[in-house]
Amino acid sequence: MKARTLLGALALVVLSLLVWELRWVLLVLFGAVVLAVALDVPISLLRRVFRFNRPAALAIVLVLLVLVGWQISNLLLPEVLQQIQQLIQLVPVLTHRLAALGSQVPWLPDLERQLTSGTYWERLQPLGAQVLGVAGGAANTSIQLLLMALLAILMALDPRSHQRLVVAATPAFYRARMATLLSECREALGGWLAGMTLSCVVVFLTTWAGLALLKVPLALLSGLVCGLLTFVPTIGPTAASLMPLAVALLVSPTKVLQVLVLRLVLQNAEAFLLTPVLLKRTVNLLPTVALMSQLCLGALLGLPGLLLALPLVVVLQVVCEEVLVRDIMDRWDGH
């Protein structure tokens, strides 16, 4: 019995090391699953309404995505590029404005002298090497994204075969339960993706409209950043607010206060009204769980882990509720 326990513990350690070594492969695979579920939502809708087969529905969805993306690019991309150029031109002005404000704080000049001294400069040199390392990994990230998209299309083309493969890898007594579990995970993940996508669109449009009404420069670019970062709850909306606040600082302190009030209203409306209403039938994540998962996966895997933390927690929450709570804890009588 001790030998079997020791062998099982050794196998668990080896499996954990293997998973850690293959963490980037598994991350790409999970990202492909998320994209496949995102594609499967409109595919299932087309199949229910028009009775298309799956390859035809997938082809229609991909063509529609390309056409919609092309039209949105034609409408918004020129103005976005123009506003990016304006932002680049405004950066020196913003720096000068921040330096002027900082000169009024007594301890900031001393901090500046310390940072420009040789000791602090030597400490900042490794940071430059890290920045170069991030830039060098951009090509590798592009390849991973292309591979993720290809895997997602293949999974969306024939999801039942992949589901049968996972079910076949489980013990015979648990295969029916596994099929149900996979279906529930897909439903929760699909509902979360649909709800978050709609929430991002609403945040983008309302932020753009609000900043335009306040006559804040770069309203479209700021709204786009706020909408995209809504996909990173808790951390994203707060970080996204920095850009419109910085641009508003170039206008006047009063404009900064107006933008701050606007973002606080929109951010709280999205967090406490819109998102709970959209996700109440699919998944309800505790803010503490969402934040800790983002911090942990962000620290372990960087930006990809931060972006995929919430969908992973959605799946893990379903697994814990169905397997840990119902199949194990609810049947544990203590004897």
Image (tube, rainbow, N blue to C red):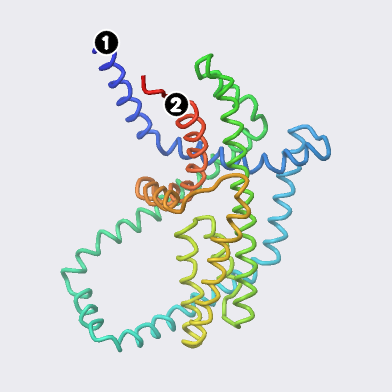
Q: In this picture, is 130 found above or below 95?
A: above
Query: Residue 198: horizontal and vertical position, in percent?
Result: 64, 56
Q: How many marks are shown on the rendered structure?
A: 2
Q: In this picture, is 30 found above or below 266?
A: above
The answer to which image quadrant residue 187 occupies is top right
Query: Residue 84: horizontal and vertical position, in percent?
Result: 54, 71
Q: Is residue 282 left or right of residue 251?
A: right
Q: Quadrant of the C terminus?
A: top left
Q: Amino acid at mark 1?
A: Met
Q: CA distance from mark 1 to mark 2?
A: 23 Å
Q: Secondary structure at mark 2?
A: helix
The residue lying toward the viewer, choosing from 84 and 136, is 84
The residue lying toward the viewer, choosing from 155 and 81, is 155
Residue 224: give its label.
none
Q: Amino acid at mark 2?
A: Ile
Q: Is residue 170 left or right of residue 5?
A: right
Query: Residue 327: horizontal and vertical position, in percent?
Result: 48, 26
Q: In this picture, is 199 found above or below 105?
A: above
Query: Residue 7: horizontal and vertical position, in percent?
Result: 28, 16
Residue 1: give its label.
1
Q: Secondary structure at mark 1?
A: loop
Find disc 2 in the rendering and name its residue.
328
